[in-house]
Image: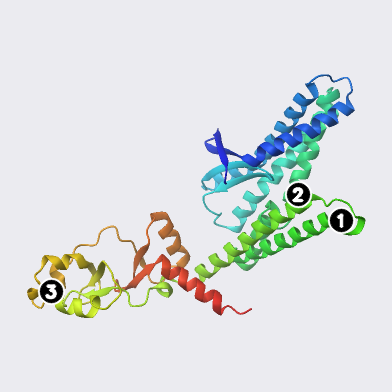
Amino acid sequence: MNRSFRVGNLFGIPFYINSSWFLVLFLVTLSYSSSLAEQFPGLGGILPLILGLIAALLLFSSVLAHELGHSFVALSQGIEVKSITLFLFGGLASLDRDSKTPGEAFWVAIAGPLVSIVLCGLFTIINRFTAITGPAASIVELLAYINLVLALFNLIPGLPLDGGNILKSIVWKITNNPYKGIIFASRVGQAFGWLAIISGLIPTFLFSRFPDFWNILIGLFLLQNAGRSAQYGEIQGTLADLTAADAIIPNSPIVSESLSLREFVNEYVIGKDSRKQFLVINEVEQLVGVIKVDDLKLVNTSEWPLVMVKELTKPVTNMETVVSKTSLLEVVSLLEQKQINELTVIDENGVLVGLIEKASIRSLLKNKAEVKPA
């Protein structure tokens, strides 16, 4: 996240704090220290402030435990946890990939609320069945209440909240399509976002009071993130329904090794889109290497009609290949994983079909979006 500071590792997971967290820490400390001072007038000096800070840190520790719940279940499924970040609205565990099944996704999602419920129960037992009194008892009671609120709030069935991920896994199970689950849960999240904003504005419109800024901020947070999730789900779903063959660039730069250099230049270089190299195929249309346009300088132009493309062809190096029926979603993942901009496509018989570029995938998605019915 932007403006986040790494403060160490937790069980091997990088731990970050967003700059917005310090503002909330200050506000919670100030608010609860004032509350403690009113409840316990005997507290003097800066003691209420110190206790307020301790309470605030314990509250954020509960949020951290919530995120660790998600993280430990993800790790048990072989999913890498890239980081945990505390920020304005709580915490975020960033996972390397999604779960492979709806059942696994369900357990990752529900793990956080379950941890919060367990903590609520634990603090309630401590408060009721131990001899603690005074400010300590008040702080423990607060921790029980906050963990209950944390669990219930996150169980709201809309993305990006845990309840939204639970709903996503249920729709995924029913439809056998994870992207339909993402889109549906995102739309529900957007609905809750609008409800939060409206509830925040009701005091102003009905009672001429200040709006509830927290509700409005939460609503905006839900709207923004649910919107992104819906867009992500739509793109991923579209990519999953397409194959590598669908994104092959028009007029892929493929030439036969049996052409002379003169034929190659006349047909593929002069007056054409400038390309630095072309894919070379043999008589059965299988990829044998590449020819670089700059290498034409190695041969005198007078000899171009006599020299074959085959003679300037170099073996293929560092060029990824996929089968034409490969899901375009897998293709995109491969491009990102390998940090490359293009790859070659072959059919089941090894015949070269064409070339895919990131730009051709973006163009395909744009065309699909333009023809999508309203």
Regarding mark 3 in the picture, which secondary structure is present there? loop
The residue that mark 3 highlights is 308
The residue that mark 2 highlights is 153
Report x, y in % for residue 319. 30, 61
Vertical placement of residue 362 versus 111, above or below: below
On residue 331, the disc is: none
Q: Residue at x 86, y 23 (%)?
A: 134
Regarding mark 2 in the picture, which secondary structure is present there? helix
The amino acid sitting under disc 3 is: Met
The residue that mark 1 highlights is 204
The amino acid sitting under disc 2 is: Phe
Quote the CA–CA distance across marks 3 and 1: 80 Å
Q: Nearer the viewer, residue 28 or 340?
A: 28
Q: How many marks?
A: 3
- Which residue lies most toward the right here? 207
State the image quarter where residue 358 is shown: bottom left
Q: Is residue 62 visible?
A: no
Nearest to N terminus: mark 3 or mark 1: 1
The amino acid sitting under disc 1 is: Thr
Report x, y in % for residue 304. 11, 75
Q: Is residue 228 visible?
A: yes
Position of the C terminus, as image quadrant, is: bottom right
Q: Residue at x 75, y 32 (%)?
A: 29
State the image quarter where residue 54 is shown: top right
The nearer-to-camera label among 3 and 1 is 1
Q: In the figure, is residue 317 to the left or right of 107?
A: left
Count residues near mark 3 (Cα–Cα under 10 Å), then give few for <14, some for 14-19, many for 20+. Answer: some
Q: Residue at x 41, y 59 (%)?
A: 334
